[in-house]
Structures are given as C-alpha cells and as structure tokens.
C-alpha cells in the first residue's frame, strides 16, 4: 500500500491530491531575461516537459517573468512544486504552484504571445515543410513539361504522317 493510500485511510491525504487531474503548474517571480529554454533546463530535472507557455508582453515580446508548464506525468508536477517553490534563481525568488484548470491559449493568442520569440523547432518544421513543397512543385513542373514535350512530339508525328499521305 502506498503512502498516499495509508494517509487517505487516516484522513491525512496530501494537499497535492486536490490537483491530481492536472499536470500543469504555474511558475512566476522569474527574471525577464530567462527564455523558454532556460526554464525547461530548470524544470526538466523533475520530468519530461510537454508544454510551456512563457507569458510575454504583446508589444515588445519581452518575458513577463511568469508562465505555465505541463509535465508528461502529474507526479513530476508534485516534485517540481515541492522542490522549486521559493528557491532563488538569478537573485529572484521563484514561485511554483499547481494549476487546477489550465486552458491553453488559442492559436491566435499563441501567435500573439510569440512576438519576438522564434521557436527553433517550429521554425525548422516550417523550413522542412517549405522545402518539401518546393520539391513537390519542381517535380510536378518537370512532369508537366515532360508530358507537354511528349504531346508536342505526338502532334508533330501526326502532322508528318498527314503530309506524307497528301
């Protein structure tokens, strides 16, 4: 029997139990100079990170020093809250807490949020997709040109036969 089960039988369930349904957490009180990569480096010691939403100023794109993060496993969220809340990071006291109901931003809000931030992974994916489409277009153009040439040769051949009969 796990410690949580024993505690719940005694009426002493962990306060984390209230957040079992959510692997999201809030982080705040951070230096505005920290990037998503820096934050992932700090939080990844407690588990696999699936999503990060660093809140940015809409006009400048500068970090506002807080955001939300999701782990693959909810237990990682408990570990991060227990171990990172209140630590000093670059002279700033970090706050980390559970989030009961996190709603990811819409696609439009996500694009607005990323003013001034270029996600290297999505940038690479866009480049690969662009290159793939360009390659497909060139292939289609070659195919069309080849077919047009073939059709033109057939037409010439028919004309020669017609002239030869006349």
Image: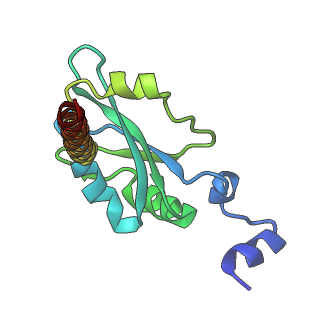
Q: Nearer the viewer, residue 164 or 113?
A: 164
Q: Position of residue 71 (x, y in %)?
A: 47, 57
Q: Quadrant of residue 163?
A: top left
Colouring used for the render: rainbow
Q: Position of residue 50 (x, y in %)?
A: 43, 55
Q: Nearer the viewer, residue 125 or 45?
A: 125
Residue at 42% from the left image edge and 48% from the top image edge: 51
> Residue pushed farthest top?
59
Q: Can I make out residue 126 in this image?
A: no
The number of discs equals 0
Residue at 22% from the left image edge and 50% from the top image edge: 38
Q: Quadrant of residue 134?
A: top left
Q: Nearer the viewer, residue 101 or 164?
A: 164
Residue at 45% from the left image edge and 28% from the top image edge: 107
**Which quadrant is home to the N terminus?**
bottom right
Q: Is residue 57 above or below residue 124?
A: above
Residue at 48% from the left image edge and 64% from the top image edge: 76
Q: Is residue 30 left or right of residue 164?
A: right
Q: Position of residue 153 (x, y in %)?
A: 18, 40
Q: Nearer the viewer, residue 98 or 166?
A: 166
Q: Is residue 45 above or below residue 126?
A: below
Q: Can I make out residue 108 in this image?
A: yes
> Residue pushed farthest bottom?
1
**Which quadrant is home to the C terminus?**
top left
Q: Position of residue 129 (x, y in %)?
A: 28, 44
> Residue pushed farthest front?
166
């Amino acid at each position: 029997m796990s410690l949580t089960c024993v505690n719940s039988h005694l009426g002493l369930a962990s306060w984390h139990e209230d957040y079992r349904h959510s692997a999201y957490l809030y982080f705040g009180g951070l230096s505005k100079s920290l990037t998503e990569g820096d934050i992932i480096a700090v939080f990844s010691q407690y588990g696999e990170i699936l999503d990060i939403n660093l809140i940015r100023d809409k006009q400048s794109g500068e970090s506002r020093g807080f955001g939300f993060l999701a782990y693959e496993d909810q237990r990682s969220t408990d570990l991060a809250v227990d171990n990172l809340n209140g630590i000093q990071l670059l002279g700033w006291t970090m706050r980390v807490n559970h989030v009961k109901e996190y709603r990811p931003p819409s696609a439009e809000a996500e694009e607005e949020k990323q003013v001034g931030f270029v996600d290297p992974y999505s940038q690479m994916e866009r480049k690969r997709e662009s290159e793939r489409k360009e390659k497909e277009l060139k292939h289609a153009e070659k195919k069309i040109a080849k077919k047009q040439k073939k059709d033109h040769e057939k037409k010439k051949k028919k004309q020669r036969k017609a002239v030869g009969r006349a």
